[in-house]
Image (cartoon, grey):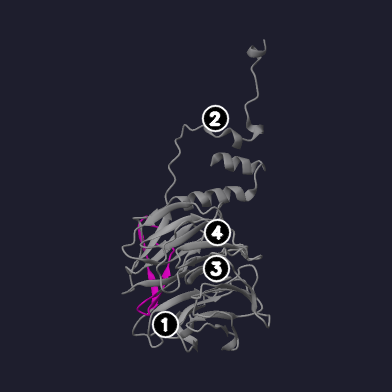
Amino acid sequence: MLGLIWARQAGLDDPLRLRRAEATRRVLSLELNKDRDVERIHGSGINTLDIEPVEGRYMLSGGSDGVIVLYDLENLTRETSYTCKALCSVGRSHPDVHKFSVETVQWYPHDTGMFTSSSFDKTLKIWDTNTLKSADAFHFKGTVYSHHMSPVATNHCLVAVGTKSPKVQLCDLKSGSFSHILQGHRQEVLAVAWSPRHEYVLATGSADGKVKLWDVRRASGCLSTLDQHNGEKSKASSEAANSAHTGRVNGLCYTNDGLHLLTTGTDDRMRLWNSFTGENTLVNYGKVCNESRKGLKFTISCGCDPEFAFVPYGSTIAVYTVFTGELITMLRGHYTAVNCCVFQPNFQELYSGSRDCNILAWIPALREPVPDDVSEKSLPQQHLNPAYEDAWSSSDDEG
């Protein structure tokens, strides 16, 4: 660590190298912390979590009981041991509470004054955070599985919604009405995700095993349908043409730069795609156990080298390197199936929700204290600035 700091001060290293190295170290040391707890409010399983991107301080959770809870993750007590308290909640007695299971919650990407939620009660609701009242609601004919707002959009306020219908619905928050629909899937749409690179590009995953990329400005809509065989389908294969998975596609997540898309399916496979060419990169993650009959909420790290994917795997969370497929570790702590997880990039923390009604906080382990007698000689030589090397000699040696 000291070698990296000196190399940065001397201008020998990329300024971001130290930050990436420390972020990576912290992710690799994630563990359940006995000093950090999250207040238990939900009376049934937790389906979805989201941390607002503005401050990284407030977290939303949605449960199978229809309840939505807002937590403050900051330690205001400054004590070593503390509990993340619930600031407020939309409980069963609230007049605007969802009637059935909440499947997705999401903060408005540019402000903490608003958030959205969707539920099996066939509604998408827009909430005012300050009053905790529903400001608007969209009603659908079928069950709502997933919704998403673009994190980078400046020219539109569209919310993409995946429902039991094979049509993807786009809701316009500005007008308060449905914008248009995207047709192409044959079965229910279980997952939707806007690109973090292009505000008009949307990815959708369906129970028909297909993943489609859309440009919502185009009349035809669909840009491409991802093919796991990259157009080289085996003659002996009975798998459908242009399918991303042989089972239901229930999870989508873009990398932070938007260059790649990670998908999960009930065929127990996870695949990484080039989001520009639509090519399957053929990274092998091995068997990724996926028994969820609805959307699976997984997440990808930000600012690490390499980046990591955190994927619910039964009652554990599997941690993979995104671009090599290596299984790094399994985070164990929940008693029953994990439904969702969310990454906090500012402090490299992970929060997970499960059917056991608990939200667990996975915190980087503390660094071992450095002994006082550590000298420059004990540091890796490749990180030492040559200008600091000992190059003098005494007059006695010269004589």
- Check the image and report above or below for 108 versus 75: below
Q: Amino acid at mark 4?
A: Cys
Q: Amino acid at mark 1?
A: Phe
Q: CA distance from mark 2 to mark 3?
A: 53 Å
Quickly name the residue at label 2. Answer: 377
Can I make out residue 176 in this image? no
State the SS at label 1: loop
Which picture quadrant has residue 39? bottom left
Q: Judge left or right: residue 369 versus residue 263.
A: left
Q: Choose the circle earlier in sequence order: 4 or 3.
A: 3
Q: Which one is in front in this view, the residue at disc 2 or the one at disc 1?
A: 1
Q: CA distance from mark 2 to mark 1?
A: 62 Å
Q: Amino acid at mark 3?
A: Ala
Q: Amino acid at mark 2?
A: Lys
Q: Which one is in front in this view, the residue at disc 2 or the one at disc 3?
A: 3
Q: Choose the circle earlier in sequence order: 1 or 4.
A: 1
Residue 232, position in %: x, y? Answer: 61, 63
Q: Judge left or right: residue 305 versus residue 63.
A: right
State the SS at label 4: loop
Q: Is residue 70 magenta?
A: yes
Q: Tell whether label 3 touches label 4 (CB within 8 Å).
A: no
Quickly name the residue at label 3. Answer: 244
Residue 368, which numbered label? none
Quickly name the residue at label 4. Answer: 302
Quickly name the residue at label 1. Answer: 120
Provide the residue span drawn in magenta: 63-89
